[in-house]
Amino acid sequence: MTAAGSTVLDIKGLVRAFGGLVAVNGLDMTVGSGEIVGLLGPNGSGKTTALNLVSGVLRPDSGAIHFAGHDIAGMATHRIARLGLGRTFQLVRVLDGMNCAENVRAGLAFHPARFARGEMDAAAIRLLERVGLKDSDQRMATELTYIDRKRLELARALALKPRLLLLDEWLAGLNPSELLIGIALIRSLKEEGLSILLVEHVMDAIRSLCDRCVVMNSGRKIAEGTPDKVLSDPAVIEAYLGAPADA
Amino acid sequence: MSAMRLAAALAACAGLAVLALLPTYVDAYYLALAIGLLQFTVLATAWGLFSGPTRYVSLATTAFFGVGAYTVAVLGELLHWPLVLLIATAIGAVMAVVVGLSTLRLSGLHFVIFTFGLAELIRQLVIWFEVNKSRVLGRYVFVDITQKDIYWQLLVLAVAVFVIGWLIARSRLGFALRIIGEDETVAKHCGINVTVAKVTLFTISAVFMTLVGAIMAPRWTYIEPSIAFNATISFEVVIMALLGGAHRLWGPALGAIPLTLLFEFLAARFPTASTLIMGVIFLLIVYALPAGVVGLWDNFRRQWRPQRVEQGAKA
């Protein structure tokens, strides 16, 4: 199941335990260039832990993570970010004490490619427009609605000029019309050539966005393939059965 | 707007000139009071430089202050004064880097307790050294520094702390610290080396505290560890910065000035109960003014801002 073209992210034998609980247990997966890969699994199956291992929040006990030509397993988060890894969080994290433009500038200012002061403001406004927050640069982050907070967080992640974007349930909690907007936004990012690894429970989004899916259960990979294939896989259905139904 | 800035700059220069000439027309009591005011203005502003954006409450002020004072007590008679200050700066900076690297990974409450313990640890180390090695418990500071000299040095230091604070606020470092204060995880994911940013600012802040201690040392003529490492200073500085509002550069000064005057008054009128009253004031500040005097001012401005924006749209 190797992706066509070059590989952006290559995870091999990733293990991380919390005491006796092995949250991620020998995970192998890849994300190819320009590909959207879905990371699925019931609650507590280790998806967010896997993302935290990739973005450097947690150190793996063993295993290798190759990203953009570097072994990033155990590397400090800020160095991984500077290599071009942007991410959003399961519980939205925006900088509430700042306005929207400053939130995006947070992503722009510490990137290896420096901006002149004027250019940075223009770039921030462009990114806000890109995610659908036109004319919001001076609004405080606290004034935003839930979907707009998600957009702002996405704009900050995009400010890093990521080679890989990690989206942790970015579409969760959106209403049906917002969901369509969100899906269209993510698809447009893929069309720009961005590689995306997304953790998601919203099945419509997975079917319409993902080129490939990896399904985890109890820290292990139990299936991999196209969305239709893995979602009809008996092992996957069994893993999800009994779990609370997600909306 | 630029006319207003120019006026503010002129007013600041005029104010500075008045302050610089102050020692020539006030008596010794008011000079001592002015020294106290400047001392706490610099300490509280330096404290706010680091603790304002990061929201780490440090009780290590007296550790750095005391180290500065002791540097003067030990070296003051041996070396030229500027060299003594330079050495104090270096010692304060090295100590801050070591302390910063080992503690700034700690979160919230652990950091507070550690910094409090640090001051006590250093005090005990100094006592141990003085008793066992140098065999003195107190030291006399005989240097050729007058009260006026102390005042002028503190004034220069106060200007320096504001200028450097202003520059930091406009720098990438200042922006990084604001992001760290909001959300450290986000800061890391924005590519910010949070350890370097925090330790750098902690060190800058600590150097100012050390220098205040060094400059103030000649005032006492006699120094012992309990004077130099007085934990009350750490608490007073926190109270002052919180009253003023630590999230703005000029906030802590707004707390330092009234509270220095108040503590001076309390120490004179109620020498036994002054600590008790200080505690009550601390509680009142935290409950009634969580964002400090500056917070009140910001609220006031926010209420006026919508009108200004409207006017801007018409223009």
Image: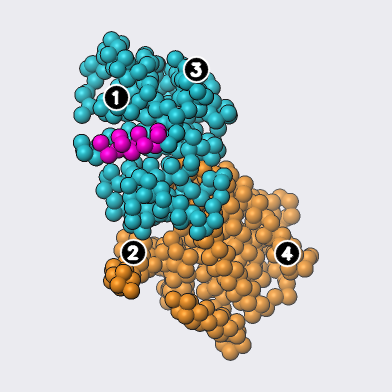
The hue in which chain A appears in the rendered picture of the protein: cyan
Residue position for label 4: B84
- Chain where mark 1 sits: A
User: Badge 1, how many Cα within 10 Å: few under 14, some, many 20+?
Assistant: some
| In the foreground, B30 or A97 | A97
Which residue lies at the image location 29% right of the left edge and 54% below the top edge?
A143
Rendered image: mark on residue A13: 3
Q: Describe residue A148's horizontal placement relative to residue B164 as left or right.
A: left
Res B139 → quadrant: bottom right
1 and 4 marks in contact (CB < 8 Å) = no
| In the foreground, B63 or A160 | A160
Mark 4 residue type: Val
Distance between the Cα atoms at labels 2 and 1? 52 Å
Residue position for label 2: B289
Q: Position of residue A123 (x, y in %)?
A: 46, 51
Mark 1 residue type: Arg
Which residue lies at the image location 73% right of the left edge and 51% below the top edge?
B133
Image: magenta residue range: A180-191
Residue position for label 1: A207
